[in-house]
Amino acid sequence: MRKTLISLLFVAALPTLAMASPEGHPARPFEHHGKPPLHQLDLSKEQQKEVRKLIGTQMKNRHEITQRYLDKLPEAERNAFQNELNANRENTDKAIKALLTPEQQKQFAEHQRKQQEKRAEHAEFLKWKAEREQKKN
């Protein structure tokens, strides 16, 4: 169980580490000289659309896989994991806000508000979906 939690924390931290490394550093596998590798391929609009779909599917699958393993953890560990992720996001948001002009801060705050609404709506949907599944079983 402990190895699973450590693995999950490592997987969750990878995107943050990749984004925190200096520009052009090898730790940023998706970036080469400031541009994504696929940008250098001069993809057609149709190819770009298909690549975006594939990446979206990969992200969705990654989320589902992570969630499967999180569901196996005891509730206390899941809560600790979620709290750490939330604290990390809040710290990043504060650091971003410190870099912005007052006008940009307003726009950023509005964006955050909309994201929070989406998260709440999604949580409500998941709750409804779980209740529906319980009724079926």
Image: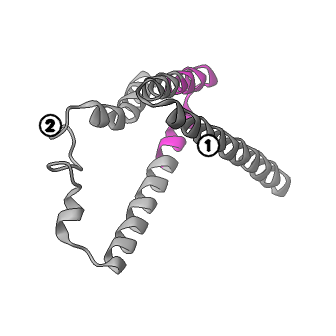
Q: Position of residue 6 (x, y in %)?
A: 39, 25
Q: Quadrant of the rendered structure where residue 108 is?
A: top right
N-terminal of the pair, mark 1 or mark 2, is: 2
Range shown magenta: 65-86
Residue 37 location, quadrant: bottom left
* Residue 9 x %, y %: 41, 28
Q: Amino acid at mark 2?
A: His
The residue under label 2 is 25
Up-down: is 86 above or below 29? Answer: above
Residue at image location 49% in from the left, 23% down from the top: 94
- Tell me whether circle 1 and circle 2 mark residues in contact (CB < 8 Å): no
Q: Which residue is mark 1?
A: 115
Q: 109 or 133, which is in the foreground?
A: 109
Q: Secondary structure at mark 1?
A: helix
- The picture places residue 83, in percent across and down from the top left corner, at 56, 22
Left or right position of 130 against 51? right
Image spot of residue 14 (x, y percent): 32, 35
Check disc 1: other Cα within 10 Å, few if <14, some if 14-19, many if 20+.
few
> Which residue is at a point 28% across and 36% down the rendered structure image?
18
Element under label 2? loop
Q: Would you say residue 82 sits in the magenta stretch?
A: yes
